[in-house]
Image (tube, rainbow, N blue to C red):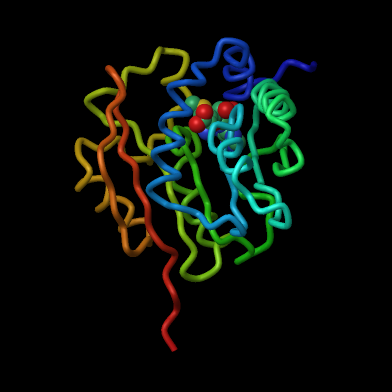
């Protein structure tokens, strides 16, 4: 495999030793908060090894559109594909190795956008693109690292977007999401061992008239 540069290279290097159980627990909590329907058109943004996409794929209706799973790191996507094959659900995931901003999908073509443990690498611009990709009233779910628990290594710090809030509380995360243009925002803190995130769910505004 050709070696990637930038944040893709960092995650390619991590792909073989990724902490799946930690990220699966965050993904499980995020999916539970947003509760996508079994037929919904869903994207897993910056999917990594598919923590969100794999859980969704295992309970999709056979006729549903495959989950769009996009990540910049070929190494992470390769691990995700392998896991999907061993779970016999690879056909339910449309894997793409690409920048997740903009998402490779038509305007207003998605019912749900999910982004676990990744928005702080993508930057605030990703949230504007999610509203482009979502139908009016569509649902979004994402996580932000809790500021008091966030201790990135020097290597990772270089890739953290400066314009994404690292919230101190669920209330602060909700206010930030509302400032990005989301409505019906709900946030809650979820702590796993020494690591904490805020889970945020919201809706895309429905134009009046
Ligand atoms: C901490 S991992 C989370 C992966 C996955 N969502 C999970 O919950 O396990 C962050 C992911 O963001 C991806 N990433 C960072 N910047 C990206 C970008 N601009 N476009 C797509 N993926 C990106 C990385 O390659 C990595 O797989």
Above or below, comparing residue 110 to residue 168 in the picture: below
Residue at 54% x, 37% y is: 52
Ligand 1 appears in which quadrant? top right
Residue most toward the right?
Answer: 1
Residue at 48% x, 28% y is: 24
Q: Nearer the viewer, residue 83 or 118?
A: 83
- Drawn side of residue 199 relative to residue 27, left or right: left
Q: Nearer the viewer, residue 119 or 58?
A: 58
Q: Position of residue 112 (x, y in %)?
A: 53, 56
Q: Position of residue 26 (x, y in %)?
A: 41, 32
Please tell me in which quadrant of the rendered image residue 179 appears: bottom left
Residue at 19% x, 48% y is: 171
Above or below, comparing residue 169 to residue 181 in the picture: above
Q: Nearer the viewer, residue 119 or 78?
A: 78
- Locate the N terminus by quadrant: top right
Above or below, comparing residue 162 to residue 40 in the picture: above
Q: How many marks?
A: 0
Please tell me in which quadrant of the rendered image residue 165 appears: top left
- Drawn side of residue 202 relative to residue 193, left or right: right
Residue at 26% x, 23% y is: 149
Q: Position of residue 9 (x, y in %)?
A: 63, 18
């Amino acid at each position: 495999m050709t070696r990637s540069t930038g944040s893709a290279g960092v995650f390619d290097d991590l792909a073989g030793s990724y902490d799946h159980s930690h990220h699966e627990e965050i993904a499980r909590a995020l999916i539970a908060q947003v509760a996508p329907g079994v037929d919904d058109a869903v994207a897993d943004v910056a999917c990594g090894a598919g923590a969100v996409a794999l859980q969704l794929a295992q309970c999709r209706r056979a006729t549903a559109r495959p989950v769009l799973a996009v990540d910049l790191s070929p190494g992470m996507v390769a691990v995700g594909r392998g896991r999907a094959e061993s779970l016999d659900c690879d056909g339910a995931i449309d894997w793409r190795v690409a920048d997740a901003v903009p998402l490779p999908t038509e305007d207003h073509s998605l019912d749900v956008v999910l982004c676990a443990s990744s928005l702080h690498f993508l930057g605030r611009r990703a949230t504007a693109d999610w509203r482009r990709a979502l139908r009016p009233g569509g649902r979004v779910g994402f996580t932000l690292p809790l500021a008091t628990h966030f201790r990135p290594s020097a290597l990772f710090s270089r890739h953290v977007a400066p314009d994404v809030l690292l919230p101190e509380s669920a209330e602060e995360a909700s206010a930030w999401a509302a400032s990005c243009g989301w409505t019906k925002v709900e946030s809650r803190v979820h702590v796993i061992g020494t690591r904490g995130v805020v889970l945020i769910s919201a809706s895309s505004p429905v134009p009046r008239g």
